[in-house]
Image: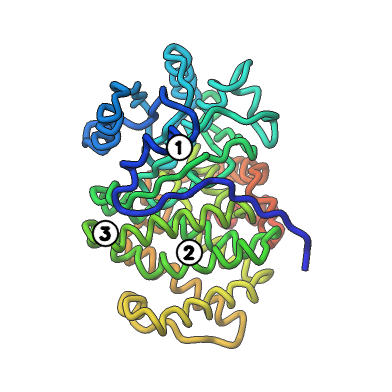
């Protein structure tokens, strides 16, 4: 067995109504004057109202809320958040939202905690000291950013995603309250859920996988295949919401410790270029990446398939959703192909697009596709892929996904 290091320092509070414990979480971190980072839609919909009420009830007044985070956050948004946080002398950061909000909050926290321009800390392991306390309250079930050590924001001047990665980016506390997801629209439920599915599958076959991340990846996939179609179709099903939310976090711990792969490299690249939602981009590329990797990872994919088959024997809803597709297969390649088919079925059940042209990507000439492939080759995610890819391979996948 290869040596490995496994790290998951974030404390996780899970359960309906747990967002009401925000004041206790801050008190344990010796903080009382946070900058709350969210987006305008969540703020207008009243998602933050119970959280803000906790501050009033505790006699702490009204906390400062930065609600200008867009769906595809960028450097300008981060800089404005840093300016506001410094103006109020924030002693902590609370993120309430999806992956874009949480990633933005992480990078804002860099700017509030260290001297110098925040972009000076782009890249891997460029932070040397702990940051201010960070509490993450996800309102989507997909990114796993609440338990990851990375953050990505867009640089519009280059059209690329900027990666920040450090053990100091882990949140101190992640509060998983499924009641905050009840109003999440079906399309966003499905898209973020497929992001989590991609985390589970890519981390299980990654070059740096390990037994601890393996167990988490398998568990997350079983929960997602079971609950994601239900949560998408019946958004008020609190049990389905709870399952997808917890599964997303579990997959987040898995991929943070094992890595992702070619699907994320392509999703990052085309998502940044054409403003495609990250979960949708992953969903489109996932079947193509899985098919490409079968040559090198059939045994690992077969293990996933047969694990799902075992889970299906105890989960009536799995077979109900997938029309009794889950039958164990001894041949690794055939089992991997069955898994590929199940991924396609899951995408269809969630009514997500399957081609780039469906999400507004224009028809690209060969030169444009080659440039995108070259950019994807430089994405850090691709280094963990189980099969080495060439620019020509990526060109083929992009064209196949169009």
Which residue does the numbered mark 3 point to in the structure image? 238
Count residues near mark 2 (Cα–Cα under 10 Å), then give few for <14, some for 14-19, many for 20+.
Answer: many
Q: Quadrant of the N terminus?
A: bottom right
Q: Eyeballing the image, is 105 above or below 304?
A: above
Give the Cα separation between the discs numbered 2 and 3.
18 Å
Q: Secondary structure at mark 2?
A: helix
Which residue does the numbered mark 2 point to in the structure image? 220
Residue depicted at 50% across the width and 78% down the height: 338
Q: List x then y, in percent, for residue 130.
A: 62, 31
- Say which of marks 2 and 3 sits in front: 3
Count residues near mark 1 (Cα–Cα under 10 Å), then give few for <14, some for 14-19, many for 20+.
Answer: many
Give the Cα separation between the discs numbered 3 and 1.
23 Å
First in residue order: circle 2 vs circle 1: 1
Q: Secondary structure at mark 1?
A: strand
Q: List x then y, in percent, for residue 376.
A: 62, 45
Question: Is residue 40 at all visible to an observer of this figure?
Answer: no
Q: Quadrant of residue 314?
A: bottom left
Q: List x then y, in percent, for residue 119.
A: 61, 23
First in residue order: circle 3 vs circle 1: 1
Residue depicted at 46% across the width and 48% down the height: 143
Which residue does the numbered mark 1 point to in the structure image? 135
Query: 369 or 141, which lies in front?
Result: 141
Residue depicted at 44% across the width and 32% down the height: 27
Query: 209 or 367, which lies in front?
Result: 209
First in residue order: circle 2 vs circle 3: 2
Q: How is the image coloured?
A: rainbow
Question: Is residue 190 at all visible to an observer of this figure?
Answer: yes
Q: List x then y, in percent, for residue 351.
A: 31, 60
Q: Quadrant of residue 237?
A: bottom left
């Amino acid at each position: 067995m290869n040596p490995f290091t496994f790290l998951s320092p974030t404390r996780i509070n899970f359960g309906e109504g747990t967002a009401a414990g925000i004041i206790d979480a801050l008190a344990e971190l010796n903080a009382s004057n946070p900058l709350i980072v969210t987006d305008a839609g969540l703020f207008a919909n009243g998602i933050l109202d119970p959280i803000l009420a906790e501050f009033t009830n505790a006699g702490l007044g009204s906390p400062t809320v930065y609600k200008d985070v867009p769906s595809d956050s960028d450097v300008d948004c981060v800089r404005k958040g840093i300016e506001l946080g410094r103006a109020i002398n924030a002693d902590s950061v609370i993120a309430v939202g999806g992956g874009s909000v949480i990633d933005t909050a992480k990078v804002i926290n860099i700017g509030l905690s260290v001297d110098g321009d925040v972009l000076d800390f782009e890249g891997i392991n460029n932070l040397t000291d702990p940051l201010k306390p960070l509490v993450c309250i996800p309102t989507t079930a997909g990114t796993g950013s609440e338990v990851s050590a990375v953050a990505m924001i867009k640089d519009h001047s280059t059209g690329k995603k900027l990666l920040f990665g450090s053990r100091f980016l882990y949140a101190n506390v992640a509060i998983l309250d499924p009641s905050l997801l009840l109003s999440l629209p079906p399309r966003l439920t499905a898209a973020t859920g497929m992001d989590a599915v991609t985390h589970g599958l890519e981390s299980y076959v990654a070059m740096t996988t390990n037994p601890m991340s393996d167990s988490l990846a398998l568990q997350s996939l079983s929960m997602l295949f079971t609950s994601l179609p239900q949560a998408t179709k019946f958004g008020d099903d609190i049990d389905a919401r709870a399952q997808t939310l917890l599964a997303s976090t579990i997959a987040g711990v898995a991929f943070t410790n094992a890595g992702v792969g070619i699907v994320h490299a392509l999703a990052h690249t085309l998502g940044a270029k054409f403003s495609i939602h990250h979960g949708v981009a992953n969903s489109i590329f996932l079947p193509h990446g899985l098919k490409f990797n079968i040559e090198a990872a059939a045994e690992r994919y077969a293990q996933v398939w047969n694990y799902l088959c075992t889970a299906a024997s105890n989960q009536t809803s799995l077979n109900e959703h997938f029309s009794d597709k889950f039958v164990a297969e001894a041949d690794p390649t055939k089992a991997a192909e069955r898994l590929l088919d199940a991924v396609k079925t899951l995408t269809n059940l969630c009514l997500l697009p399957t081609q780039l042209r469906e999400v507004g990507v224009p028809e690209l000439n060969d030169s444009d596709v080659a440039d995108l492939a070259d950019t994807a080759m430089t994405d850090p995610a691709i280094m963990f892929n189980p099969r080495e890819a060439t620019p020509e391979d990526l060109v083929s996948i992009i064209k196949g996904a169009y």
